[in-house]
Image: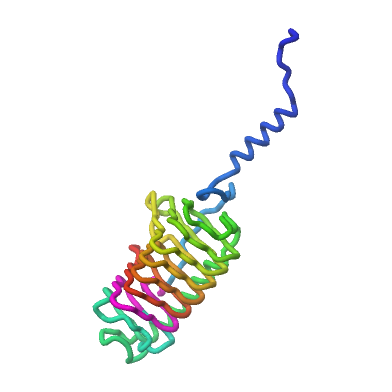
Amino acid sequence: MTKFQHRSNPRKRLLAALLAVAVVGVGSAGFGGAAAADSIPQTPVALGVAGTFAILSKTGVTDVPSSAVTGNVGSSPISGAAILLTCPEVTGTIFSVDAAGPPCKVTDATLLTSAVGDMGIAYTDAAGRVNPDFVNLGAGEIGGRTLVPGLYTWSTDVSLSSDVKLSGGPDDVFVFQISGNIDQAPAKNVTLVGGVQAKNVFWQTAGAVTLGTTAHFEGTILSKTMIAMNTGASINGRLLAQTAVTLQSNTVTEPVE
């Protein structure tokens, strides 16, 4: 060995190995948040009869005309008088528990009882899933991020102050568990890329949901309380609320199954 020959440094080799492991182990959901290496893909939340509705609530559906709803609408156990959508605004069937409501309504208390029951079961399923891939991502601010499939959980409110992308394939599932509210800023959008389907996106929230003026949202919302769509907001998904749904000249389109 000459005096210029390099000798291996065990400490440097160890540091390099640890750095390599750290780099491989860090994934991203936009700008931070790591998915577990042994993450198990999520399965869709079973909606049961609730999945046959674009809008389903327990305490009514208010509306500032005119809105455009593609899919069925129902409310139970409250009287059909609490459904304020008009017949021309709905491409689908308006279901009521009684004789009150829009003149085109169909009275089917049994169907609505099943649907509302299944809505509660679906909420419990989504809220009860364990081993999340992402915990409190962005401290609740997910605006500007591209999110990958998996199970997300927050102990806070979730805000969308800028656009959000959900990236994956047609069979990938996203489940969002939120202990607080969802607040989407005006004119911001949730978009699906790579073939992601709205039917495989589920937002479970213990708090209220507000979709901002002219904003666009994707997926099924399972809210323990109310869902409010501000003027001109749209959703490709479902509004399943355990209190009320409020509309203001909105577009609601049930996802393709």
Which one is in front, 207 or 169? Answer: 207
Picture quadrant where residue 61 is located: bottom left
Q: Is residue 204 left or right of residue 89?
A: right
Provide residue 63's location: percent of width, then percent of height.
34, 79
In the rendered image, which quarter contains the C terminus? bottom left
Q: Indicate whether residue 58 is drawn in magenta.
A: yes
Picture quadrant where residue 27 is located: top right
Residue 37 against residue 1 in the figure, above or below: below
Residue 200 showing in the rendered view:
yes
Picture quadrant where residue 86 is located: bottom left
What's drawn in magenta, residue-wise? 49-73
* Residue at (39% x, 49% y) in the render: 194
* Residue at (35% x, 89% y) in the render: 81
Q: Indicate whether residue 138 is drawn in magenta.
A: no
Q: Is residue 130 left or right of residue 4?
A: left
Residue 124 against residue 142 in the figure, above or below: below
Residue 132 showing in the rendered view:
no
Which one is in front, 107 or 210? Answer: 210
Provide residue 131's location: percent of width, then percent of height.
60, 58
Residue 40 against residue 216 in the figure, above or below: above
Provide residue 166's location: percent of width, then percent of height.
44, 54
